[in-house]
Each structure stands twice: as C-alpha cells, then as structure tokens.
Image: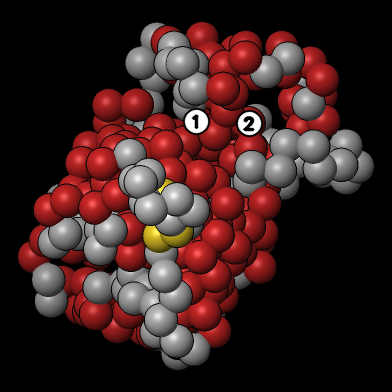
Amino acid sequence: MNIPLTAQSNPGKPEKFDVKAFALELRQDIEQNRIRLPTLPTLSLEALLVVNDAASNMTDIGKIIGKDTSMATRLVRYANSPLYGGVHKVTSVKGAVIRIGVNAVRSAILNLAMHDVFTTHHTLIQDRMEGLWKHSVAVAIRAVLLASYFKQLDRGEAMLAGLIHDVGIIPVLIKASEYSVLLEKESNLDKLVSHLHMTLGKFILSFWNFEPFLIEVAGSHDNLDRDSLGGDVDYLDIIQVANVLSYDGTDHPYTQLDLSEIPVFKKLGIDLIEEVRQKMAAGEYESELTIALQ
C-alpha cells in the first residue's frame, strides 16, 4: 500500500512532511518483511556458528577467524586493548583467543562486527551514520568503565550493549534517505528517530537472535523513568547511565536533567558516576578502545 508522505491543507501553502504516515509505512514494512535490516558480516556469522558449537575448541575458532586477515588483525588488537591487555602483547589469533577466553570470544566477534553494521553506501546519510557509530562507541566505552565496578557484569558484554543500543536508528536513516524533506529538515528526522528507534532495535536484535538482555537494552535505554531501583545493577542500568554521560559537554537535552531524580542514577550512586566522569575526562581507556573497535 502506498501512503502519501506529504499533506497539503491549503493549495497556496508548501507541503508538510507527514511524520505519522512515514512511521506507519515503516511499521508496515517491518510486519511484511520489506524493511532493509542491517546484517552482520558473513564471516562473523560463520565464526559465531563455530563458537556456539559445543564441540569446537580454540584451534577451530582460530582457523575460522584466521580466514580473514582483517578480522584476525582486529581480534589481536582487541585482545591487547585495556579490556583484556596483559603484561605482554599477543601477536597471533590463537594467542588472542586464549587471552580473551572461549566464552568471551562471541561478544568479541560481535563487537568487532558492529562497525560494519553501521556502514552505509547511501552518501546522503553517511555523516549521520558516522555520527551514530561515534556515539555508540562513546556509550560503549563508558559502559565498560561502569561495568568494572560490578562483579556480576562482563566488560565485553557491556561494550556490546553500548554498541547496539541505538541499532534501531539505522533502518530509519536508510529509509529516510529516500525523502529529501527529511534530509533537508533534520528536526523531522530527529522526531522519527526518537519515536521509532527503540521498537526497531528490539525487532532487529530479535531477528539476529541476540540475548534477551541485549534486546531489552535496545528497546528501553531511553526510558529513564523506569523503576530500576530493585535488584542488582544490570546491563540496561549501565547503558542508560553511559548514554546520558556520553552527552557531557554538548547541548543535548540530557545535559539539563537533574540526575539525582533519575531512578537508575540513584541506583548506581552519584559518587560512582562522578568518578567515571573523572576517568573519562582523563582519557582513560577511550583512545585505545576506540582504536580496538576500528
């Protein structure tokens, strides 16, 4: 069904973009499997199959990763990052897998694959996609720092949660590239992103068979009024805090929030959050982790 994306109330007035019609069309695309979802690189999917096979060992994992020089190089660089770096640098895929550990290799592969997911051939939205990737990395780095304070959280998984939290924005940007009115007036595009990205994020990660905690992150990270005070600190908690902190020094509306009134900030504690801010200001982790994800 073709839905008009413009409405004209008076013949003498310029057409106005219909945000609700766009949202409805995008939802129908999802329901009818017409939406162009971002995909994980083929080799990453092959590697994940090997990692998820209970019969596989480190040699099997090393062989599949070693098939791609780029992935092998990136995995070694990742293993030498502050997430896992030891006294001596590893120089081989086998050494990287041993350092990271078989159980953590899955999240490592996904972390390294995410940059490809945020790549587009649509030149009209290239800058916006690059900005989205940079924001996702900024959130991921802060999530790693926050996770280091809680023994029940894995820093590699925290990084992955940060990288995927806004993945639902990607199909909105791709579809928006078809409409000049959205590219010329970004306020309309911002409304669409705000309205749709969490629903789409849940859909994409469910389609990829990601773990429920990651689907929850993609689907709820901007719901700052949720009741999060009960139970242990989880990945959604740290992504919500990391997301807000990533806007420090900008004019984003999140910088105007009273953090002492937000449930998740009460849960983690303002003192801990200020400590993380100080570490970020000192440049701790940031440059090395950013390089590791390239």
Residue in the image at 34% along x and 69% along y: 38
Instruction: List x then y, in percent, for residue 54.
Output: 50, 86
* Element under disc 2: helix
Which numbered dot is residue 241? 2
As drawn, the residue found furthest toward the right would be 230
Q: Is residue 237 left or right of residue 35?
A: right
Residue at mark 1:
142
Earlier in the chain: of badge 1 and badge 2, it is 1
Q: Is the C-beta separation of discs 1 and 2 under 8 Å? A: yes
Could you tell me which secondary element the residue under label 1 belongs to? helix
| Residue 178 pos. (x, y %) | 25, 63
Residue 47 rendering spot, x and y as whole percentages = 31, 78
**In the image, is 259 to the left or to the right of 78?**
right
Neighbour tally class for label 1: few under 14, some 14-19, many 20 plus, Cα within 10 Å: many
Horizontal side of 205 relative to 110 (left or right) equals: right
Q: Quadrant of residue 167?
A: bottom left
Above or below: residue 210 compared with residue 283:
below
Image point 63% across, 57% down: which residue?
Answer: 219
Residue 105 visible in image: no
Nearer to the camera, 206 or 178:
178
Query: In 3D space, how far apart are the residues under numbered discs 1 and 2 (Cα atoms)?
Result: 8 Å
Task: Please tell me which residue is depicted at 45% across the width and 87% down the height of the picture.
Answer: 1
Q: Quick check: 131 left or right of 221?
A: left
Q: Position of residue 66 (x, y in %)?
A: 15, 71
Q: Nearer the viewer, residue 99 or 75?
A: 75
- Is residue 246 positioned above or below 81 on the image? above
| Number of the label disc, if any, that sits on residue 45 | none
